[in-house]
Image: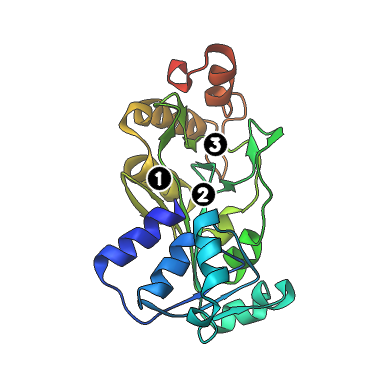
Amino acid sequence: MNDAVFKSLREAGFRNLSAWTEVAQDSLLELYQEGMMDSLSCTSLMLTPKTLQHVYENPGEYKEGVILRPQEISNNIEVIRRLRVIAINTAVEVDLLGNVNSTHILGRNVINGIGGSGDFSRAAYLSIYITPSVRKEGRISSIVPLVTHVDIPDHDVDVVITEHGVCDLRGLSPREKAQLIIENCADPAYREPLHEYYWRALSRGGHIPVDLDRAFDFHKAYMNTGDMRSTR
């Protein structure tokens, strides 16, 4: 997903970009090579063999603008805040409250570590999370009533983006967030069951629209049938 964002930046013709990140991938180095990025600071490089070979063979191309820093600096909350970083991270799933799960499947199977996303989300000038609205040919919705594992709490999530739209969650109440996420980010095939969940949750009362009896119906449907669309 991040590669898609950087590709869009390239197509939009942005210039004089600077990147401050923990791990740099091919797409960032390509922006630097093409002269669209003036500087790149990171702790490590995670490159394809072809790009890594190019770096080894042409170190002079990178010595002026690419720097590797210790993690204590690249992930330092004070530095991230001072630089007013726009942080872009990837979510496995996002719930109607704006909480993000970026590491677990069905709450128990780890697919990757959280990395520095927590540091960047907490301190960034703008914390953005991107995800496709569905996976597995539509059988899995990335927008769910309640995530099965919380890596990034809603307080540290400013914007959620899928291919269907953008949700700017800043300053919104939990009820406002839920409705906006459904309308702007959920896949159309899942909007009706998400709305049904939301109205049931409202009927329960309280400050936060949560129905604990039905909060994981999407995940249970997938475990039972292999398709979250069977939720009812």
Residue 114, percent from left and from top: 67, 53
Residue at disc 3, secondary structure = loop
Whether residue 158 is visible to the viewer of this picture, yes or no, is: no
Q: Amino acid at mark 2?
A: Gly
Residue at disc 2, secondary structure = loop
Quadrant assignment, res 16 = bottom left
Q: Reading the chain from its start, which is encountered first: label 1 or label 2?
A: 2
Q: Reading the chain from its start, which is encountered first: label 3 or label 1?
A: 1
Residue 208 badge: none
* Nearest to viewer (mark 3 / mark 2): 2
Residue at disc 1, secondary structure = helix
Residue 181, percent from left and from top: 40, 45
Query: Closer to the camera, 14 or 105?
Result: 14
Q: Reading the chain from its start, which is encountered first: label 3 or label 2?
A: 2
To which residue does mark 2 refer?
A: 98
To which residue does mark 3 refer?
A: 205
Q: Amino acid at mark 1?
A: Ile
Q: With 224 as the anchor, is 15 left or right in this view?
A: left
Query: Closer to the camera, 123 or 104?
Result: 104
Contact check, label 1 and label 2, Cβ < 8 Å? yes
* Residue at left offset 57%, top offset 36%: 146
Q: CA distance from mark 3 to mark 2?
A: 19 Å
Is the residue marked by circle 2 packed among few (<14), some (14-19), or many (20+) residues within 10 Å? many
Q: CA distance from mark 3 to mark 1?
A: 20 Å
Q: Amino acid at mark 3?
A: Gly
Whether residue 150 is visible to the viewer of this picture, yes or no, is: yes
To which residue does mark 1 refer?
A: 181
Q: Report the label total.
A: 3
Query: Closer to the camera, 3 or 173?
Result: 3
